[in-house]
């Protein structure tokens, strides 16, 4: 059970949050120009990330705000978060490297 | 007689005699006894039967690692299966039953079925029971095998969960844990020390030790005082840390009342499951001694060497008269000294090592006890109790066993194969282990959370490693003795037990290896080593080492299986906590609940809400009441408490554009005051939600949703708003519980509304079907939607919940002349089925697209983007053969079963290809016949076809029709 720091409320238990899929997933539109394989890619294909993963989380039993979380799927370490619509901080790929 | 009570040294309260029964026989013990020590004092050797072969088993340990001595504790409704006798204190009137045997542990008739032996080899689950199939075998096997029986009655005791945050959590109150707790206490940290025993002290509760000038017990008392002197230290006994999760969250199971009286409802919870978050975790969980592997090593009378010390010193009982000790390390020498001090005869100490020369070895020699160096016990002999052991010389360096052998008479064997640190919690925390070749044990290496293992849990087994006040002694190193060399015929064919609880032998390990189950996780499942409640506390390392030997790998290469919570079994009651009975899940009552109660409503659960199913008049049946309510609405007017209806406000400059992306309808084209029946899809184009929504103002929409979806849809809208279209100026406000709704249905509903004197013109032209009007009554905001889920003229009147009662009562009062009556959910469901209105989730499933329920044209017409649009042109969505929602006109007078299977054309009885199912079915009081809806393969093209339906009760016939059975032209709603 993680402790997750909501950027609006502070540190809370994972129970209060909802995982809402990978961040930065581009929704292809308009429908008439989207091929079956592009649509399948968006709808079904997910990377099974080993290491650092950028994820959407919603504090649905708290402030109801969604944000992006940087999480290590191996060590379960959480490095931080950034707002919806923002890009991850520079150098996020290297966050897991040993200091 | 073998085991017996020793003279008092003050550890037990000899003043207080306690009686209890085991397998129907009464025994006596003293206050301070565990079940195990008391049975031992009563000379009971056989306390249970083994899992597969029903071999007699005795007490082998003195703590949580006990694999044999488990019992069914207490009487119904308080009974608990699989309680370890070694960790449970006796109490007056306690009743115990041995598990896994019939009629009792001593005379187990199931053991006679020696034929079982052939079956239960490694992987027997997968081999033996293949023919004629597991279904054939399972009732027999389940009868014979299995530990304990599930209590049949509801435990009336309370259980609870509690949360706690601390700076430092110390698990285990042995010398290492106590020291750590005091050190952190001095730094002003909030410290919690948890201990599974009922007192602190750990191994010092039974070891002869001198700490500075204090005996072990005096030292413990001194530490107790020290801990008490720190207000920032909390000590919890009878509390086992059973699980270690992310971010230093630990589950601790605390037993609060069982030691007072198992068979009684206490004032406090029986058990508590604590959720503890700690900044830092210190694991001082100790170590567990390993058994030695030799023939018949499961005979009663064979115990872990340290367990013997526990019984002699702590429980004042000797498990035997004539004792042999077998070991590969120095620690077991302590047992020889302890027994001699207690006046118990030690026949010999059999040490596999050629020339041990540690301090303890000399001490035993000086005590005049014979030490057989370079020898091992190869076999235990006896019937239901050890009577002698066979000993042979061994050369450990060459792994050669001599053919020479001799017997030693004894009734107790203390064995020690070295110690394994209790690393379960460390491993659960994500920490890694390393095999220490000197200590012959897995010890913690890498930590991934803020925790540390100390003391024996970290491989430091000597007290002098932990307490600086203890004089260090010289120990001779442990030497590996995992299994006996198998060249000798008598060894090769004998059963040498590795996992006592799950009845796994060394030959099972060999067999699994030969069959290539060499990955440790495969091996575990194939042989079932380390499973069940014991989780391999004593067996795992021996099994791994033997697996390594037969596959020519060293132990680190074999590795360990993942340690999983719980460390010791947790009762279902503790897991459930308060979430049982009425508190199993929250019950939601309507604001008008008390009115409904007073009006003889019969309630039922609809999703999360408790709602009136119907109102009962006199002695009428449910069916009669529902029919009466339906006919009353159809002919006059009825009011329904419709408050669970999902209600969501969507406001903002971009509200129309926003909702345009969700509904298949053209939202942007809607005029103010207009309402629409809308469908929402998910991205797979599955129909997710239907409901009436309306435009109250240019920038203000009012959505109503299925009551079961109210929270989900509000969340769905907001998630998309925040994550996908954050640039849209829109606010989503769920208001389902804040606002109540009264549905007014029936030909006289307009007249009823007009009695309220609102400033709304209810004339048909002024306020037509599918429009909305907002007004205020006094200062109360009211929204009236002209819509119908019954097929009659109807309105849904919504207002803040606190005004529901006034409104409800006003309608009933003013509508007296119109003969207004309340009606319940069941009547509504009958009317909507008569009308063929779809119930999303009931008449649809996860494959249903708008085209399958008659809304294909609407979806296809819309060119702008909406959620799910692209999936409507996937191959699966476009194909002809889809299940479509149709009406089913029943032939005959039986009501079709919901879920009834529709058979393919030409079949009148199963087995038959399945072409759909009945989704809704009622007896229609309006039409005086049963009507139904169903999803039928290619249904739209099969109008008029007669189909056959079956379920477990029988078979039925129906004709495929359109979904609407009542007022097919739809004129009434416009009346
Ligand atoms: Zn928050």
Image (spheres, coloured by chain):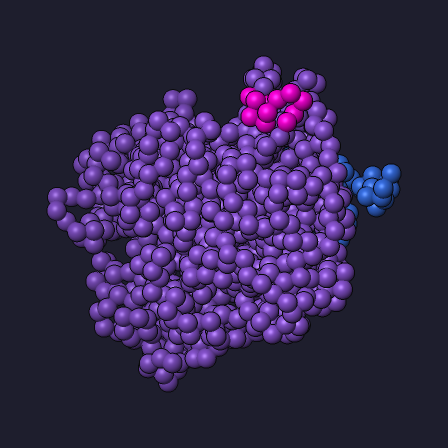
Magenta span of residues: B210-221
Nearest to the observer: residue A41 or residue B640: A41
**Position of residue B303 measured from the top left corner of the image (x, y, whole percent):** 52, 50
Q: Is residue B892 left or right of residue B292?
A: left
Nearest to the observer: residue B838 or residue B550: B550
Colour-to-chain, blue: A
Q: Is residue B289 left or right of residue B645?
A: right
Identified at 57% across, 30% down, the residue is B201
Identified at 34% across, 50% down, the residue is B97
Q: Is residue B894 left or right of residue B734?
A: left
* Residue B184 picture quarter: top right
What colour denotes chain B? purple
Nearest to the observer: residue B297 or residue B907: B297
Nearest to the observer: residue B762 or residue B485: B485
* Residue B759 picture quarter: top left
Identified at 71% across, 39% down, the residue is B359
- Is A22 one of the magenta-colored residues? no
Q: Is residue B203 visible?
A: yes
Q: Is residue B628 left or right of residue B859?
A: left
Q: Is residue B668 visible?
A: no
**Position of residue B819 measured from the top left corner of the image (x, y, whole percent):** 19, 40
**Position of residue B334 measured from the top left corner of the image (x, y, whole percent):** 61, 40
**Position of residue B208 measured from the top left corner of the image (x, y, whole percent):** 59, 32
């Amino acid at each position: 059970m993680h402790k997750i720091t909501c950027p609006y409320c502070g540190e809370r238990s994972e129970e209060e949050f909802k995982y809402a899929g990978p961040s930065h997933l581009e929704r292809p539109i308009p429908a008439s120009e989207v091929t079956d394989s592009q649509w399948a890619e968006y709808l079904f294909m997910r990377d099974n990330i080993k290491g650092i993963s950028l994820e959407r989380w919603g504090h649905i039993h708290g402030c109801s705000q969604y944000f992006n979380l940087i999480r290590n799927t191996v060590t379960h370490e959480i490095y931080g978060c950034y707002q919806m619509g923002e890009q991850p901080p520079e150098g996020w790929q290297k966050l897991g490297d040993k200091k | 007689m073998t085991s017996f009570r020793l003279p008092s040294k003050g550890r037990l309260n000899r003043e207080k005699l306690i009686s209890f029964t085991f397998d129907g026989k009464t025994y006596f013990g003293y206050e301070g006894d565990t079940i195990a020590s008391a049975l031992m004092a009563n000379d009971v050797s056989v306390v249970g039967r083994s899992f597969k072969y029903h071999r007699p088993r005795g007490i082998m340990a003195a703590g949580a690692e006990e694999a044999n001595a488990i019992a069914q504790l207490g009487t119904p409704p308080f009974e608990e299966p699989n309680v370890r006798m070694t960790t449970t204190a006796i109490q007056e009137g306690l009743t115990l039953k041995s598990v896994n045997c019939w009629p009792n542990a001593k005379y187990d008739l199931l053991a006679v079925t020696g034929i079982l032996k052939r079956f239960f080899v490694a992987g027997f689950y997968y081999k033996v029971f293949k023919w004629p199939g597991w279904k054939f075998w399972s009732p027999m096997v389940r009868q014979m095998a299995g530990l304990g029986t599930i209590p049949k009655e509801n435990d009336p005791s309370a259980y609870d969960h509690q949360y706690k945050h601390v700076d430092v959590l110390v698990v285990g109150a042995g010398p290492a844990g106590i020291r750590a707790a005091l050190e952190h206490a001095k730094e002003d940290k909030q410290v919690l020390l948890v201990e599974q025993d009922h007192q602190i002290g750990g191994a010092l509760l039974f070891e002869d030790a001198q700490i500075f000038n204090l005996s072990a017990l005096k030292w413990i008392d001194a530490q107790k005082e020290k801990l008490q002197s720190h207000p920032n230290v909390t000590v919890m006994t009878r509390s086992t840390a059973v699980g270690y999760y992310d971010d230093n969250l630990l589950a601790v199971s605390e037993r609060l009342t069982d030691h007072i009286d198992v068979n009684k409802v206490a004032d406090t919870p029986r058990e508590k499951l604590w959720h503890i978050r700690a900044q830092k975790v210190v694991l001082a969980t100790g170590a567990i001694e390993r058994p030695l592997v030799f023939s018949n090593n499961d005979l009663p009378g064979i115990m872990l060497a340290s367990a013997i010390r526990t019984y002699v010193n702590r429980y004042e009982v000797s498990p035997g008269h004539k004792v042999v000790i077998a070991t590969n390390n120095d620690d077991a020498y302590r047992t020889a000294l302890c027994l001699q001090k207690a006046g118990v005869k030690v026949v010999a100490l059999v040490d596999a090592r050629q020339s041990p020369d540690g301090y303890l070895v000399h001490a035993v020699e000086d005590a005049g006890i014979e030490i057989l160096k370079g020898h091992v016990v190869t076999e235990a002999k006896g019937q239901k109790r050890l009577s002698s052991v066979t000993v042979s010389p061994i050369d450990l360096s060459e792994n050669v066993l001599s053919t020479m052998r001799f017997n030693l008479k004894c009734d107790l064997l203390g064995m020690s194969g070295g110690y394994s640190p209790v690393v379960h919690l460390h491993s659960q925390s994500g920490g890694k282990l390393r095999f220490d070749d000197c200590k012959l044990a897995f010890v913690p290496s890498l930590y991934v959370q803020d925790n540390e293992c100390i003391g024996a849990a970290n491989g430091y087994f000597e007290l002098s490693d932990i307490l600086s006040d203890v004089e260090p002694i010289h120990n001779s190193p442990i030497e590996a003795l995992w299994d006996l060399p198998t060249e000798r015929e008598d060894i090769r064919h004998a059963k040498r037990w590795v996992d006592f609880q799950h009845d796994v032998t060394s030959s099972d390990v060999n067999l699994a290896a030969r069959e290539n189950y060499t990955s440790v996780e495969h091996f575990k499942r194939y042989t079932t080593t380390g499973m069940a409640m014991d989780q391999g506390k004593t067996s795992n390392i021996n099994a791994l080492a033997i697996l390594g030997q037969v596959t020519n790998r060293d132990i680190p290469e074999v590795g360990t299986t993942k340690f999983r919570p719980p460390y010791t079994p947790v009762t279902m009651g503790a897991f459930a906590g308060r979430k049982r009975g009425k508190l199993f899940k929250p019950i939601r009552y309507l604001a008008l609940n008390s009115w409904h109660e007073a009006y003889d409503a019969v309630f039922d659960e609809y999703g999360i809400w408790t709602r009136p199913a119907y109102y009962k008049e006199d002695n009428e049946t449910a069916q009669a009441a529902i029919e009466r309510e339906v006919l009353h609405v159809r002919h006059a007017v009825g009011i329904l408490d419709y408050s669970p209806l999902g209600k969501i406000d969507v406001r903002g400059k971009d509200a129309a554009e926003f909702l345009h992306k969700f509904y298949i309808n053209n939202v942007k084209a809607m005029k103010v005051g207009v309402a629409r029946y809308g469908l929402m899809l998910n991205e797979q184009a599955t129909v997710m939600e239907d409901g009436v929504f309306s435009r109250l103002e240019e920038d203000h929409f009012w959505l109503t949703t299925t009551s079961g979806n109210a929270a989900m849809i509000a969340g769905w809208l907001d998630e998309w708003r925040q994550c996908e279209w954050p640039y849209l100026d829109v606010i989503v406000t769920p208001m389902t519980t804040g606002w109540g709704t009264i549905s007014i249905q029936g030909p006289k509903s307009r007249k009823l509304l007009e009695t309220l004197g609102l400033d709304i013109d209810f004339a048909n032209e002024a306020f037509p079907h599918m429009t909305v009007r907002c007004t205020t009554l006094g200062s109360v905001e009211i929204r009236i939607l002209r819509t119908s889920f019954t097929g009659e003229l109807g309105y849904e009147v919504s207002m803040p919940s606190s005004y529901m009662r006034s409104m409800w009562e006003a309608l009933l009062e003013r509508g007296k002349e119109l003969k207004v009556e309340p009606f319940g959910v069941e009547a509504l469901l009958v009317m909507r089925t008569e009308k063929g209105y779809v119930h999303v989730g009931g008449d649809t499933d996860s494959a249903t697209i708008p085209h399958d329920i008659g809304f294909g044209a609407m979806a296809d017409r819309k060119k702008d983007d909406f959620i799910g649009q692209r999936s409507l042109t996937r191959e699966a969505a476009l194909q002809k053969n889809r299940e479509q929602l149709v009406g089913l006109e029943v032939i005959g007078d039986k009501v079709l079963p919901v879920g009834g299977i529709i058979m393919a054309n030409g079949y009148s009885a199963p087995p038959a290809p399945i072409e759909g199912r009945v989704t809704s079915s009622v007896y229609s009081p309006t039409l005086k016949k049963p009507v139904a809806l169903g999803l039928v393969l290619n249904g739209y093209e099969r109008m008029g076809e007669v189909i056959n339906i079956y379920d477990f009760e029988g078979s039925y016939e129906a004709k495929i029709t359109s979904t609407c059975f009542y007022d097919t032209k739809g004129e009434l709603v416009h009346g």
